[in-house]
């Protein structure tokens, strides 16, 4: 009994020390918040995901149907996984496109592609954990594999998932990128927090395409972000004519109207700073955009995902 008790106390102390080290390191690397959950099967999300896919709310994002089991169980992504470290990185900015009539880009696309920025931080993070704690096996994730990032962030107490299906942090709203480290090290897990959406329906009422079909359920195939980025068809569906609210890459409407985003603060990541030339483009500049200007402006940007032809398609759809 004595030896077992000593072992448990020793293990608990180590877990505590490792957890504190990891949370401090996350802050040091510039992440806004860090939460931890036990790496196990996402029971509740399994049912929601299955229903969502059956309703074809994934539109033409057929990849959402792949790796169903891996999406729900991190132990299938990392052998012996014990902990999921969820991280939030703020991208909110008060900078705006200068011409109010210019086609609009989502705030997250103003600066350098977040995949590059966060991947660099995550690789450094994992390397630091390995050199400070010892032999830790793990993988880093930022939108690049079948990981249900909002579910893990919610589970680890970094916010609740709102009626617009975005993660909302009670102190800073929802303008965050979410990333994960899945590792085979046991850490102290955090617990979820309460949902504070209450009776508010601002996001549902404001969505230009009625993509939020019921509270907490978004029909992805109607979402402007899907239409302008994920959908690769040569022409956008005619049913959305006049409903795009002037967006050509992503959409911020359901976040802009969310009362919790009155607490949003400006990010302090230099790599997210916008190109001045980008913000100063007027309505006509966008209409006359050339592939050369596209390549110059969006060299390291997430907007490269649409390619020049895709962005041109979106611009044309607004003006035809």
Image: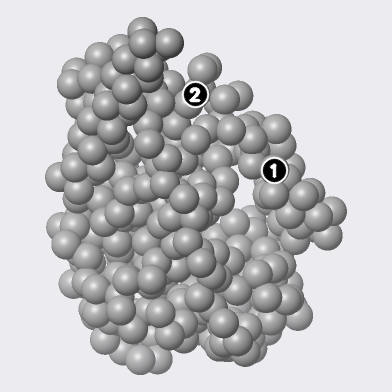
Q: Would you call the spot at circle 2 few (<14 residues within 10 Å), some (14-19), or many (20 or more)?
A: many
Task: Give the residue number, with chain letter if any, for mark 2.
Answer: 81
Asked if marks 1 and 2 touch (Cβ < 8 Å), the reply is no
Relative to 13, is 251 on the left or the right? right
Q: Residue at x 20, y 48 (%)?
A: 27
Quarter-of-image position of residue 270? bottom left
Q: Would you call the spot at circle 1 few (<14 residues within 10 Å), some (14-19), or many (20 or more)?
A: few
State whether residue 290 is above or below residue 131.
Answer: below
Residue 94, percent from left and from top: 24, 79
Q: CA distance from mark 1 to mark 2?
A: 17 Å
Residue found at the far front of this picture:
1
Task: Give the residue number, with chain letter if any, for mark 1.
Answer: 43
Relative to 14, is 248 on the left or the right? right
Mark 1 lies on a secondary structure that is helix
State whether residue 257 is above or below residue 109.
Answer: below
Residue 268, percent from left and from top: 16, 62
Residue 139 in sight from this viewpoint = no
Relative to 105, is 133 on the left or the right? left
In this view, the residue in front, 204 or 247, is 204
Residue 3, percent from left and from top: 36, 8
């Amino acid at each position: 009994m004595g030896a077992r008790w000593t072992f448990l106390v020793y293990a608990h102390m180590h877990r505590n020390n490792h957890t504190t080290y990891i949370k401090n390191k996350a802050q040091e690397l510039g992440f806004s918040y860090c939460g931890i959950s036990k790496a196990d099967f996402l029971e509740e999300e399994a049912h929601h995901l299955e229903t969502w896919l059956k309703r074809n709310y994934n539109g033409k994002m057929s990849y959402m149907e792949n790796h169903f089991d891996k999406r729900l169980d991190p132990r299938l992504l990392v052998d012996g996984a014990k902990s999921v470290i969820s991280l939030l990185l703020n991208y909110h900015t008060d900078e705006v496109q200068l011409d109010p009539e210019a086609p609009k880009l989502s705030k997250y696309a103003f600066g350098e592609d977040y995949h590059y920025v966060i991947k660099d931080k995550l690789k450094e993070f994992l390397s630091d954990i390995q050199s400070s704690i010892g032999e830790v096996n793990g993988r880093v994730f930022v939108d690049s594999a079948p990981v249900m990032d909002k579910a893990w962030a919610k589970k680890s107490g970094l916010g609740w998932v709102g009626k617009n299906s975005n993660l909302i942090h009670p102190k800073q709203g929802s303008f965050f990128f979410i990333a994960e480290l899945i590792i085979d090290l046991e850490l102290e897990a955090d617990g979820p927090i309460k949902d504070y959406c209450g009776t508010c329906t601002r996001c549902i009422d404001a969505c230009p395409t009625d993509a939020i079909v019921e509270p907490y359920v978004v029909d992805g195939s109607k979402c402007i972000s899907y239409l302008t980025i994920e959908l690769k068809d040569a022409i956008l569906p005619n049913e959305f004519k006049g409903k795009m609210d002037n967006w050509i890459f992503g959409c911020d409407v359901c976040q802009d109207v969310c009362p919790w985003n009155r607490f949003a603060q400006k990010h302090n990541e230099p790599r997210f700073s916008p190109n001045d030339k980008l913000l100063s483009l007027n309505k006509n500049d966008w209409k006359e955009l050339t592939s050369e200007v596209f390549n110059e402006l969006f060299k390291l940007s997430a907007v490269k995902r649409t390619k020049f032809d895709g962005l041109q398609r979106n611009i044309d759809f607004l003006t035809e």
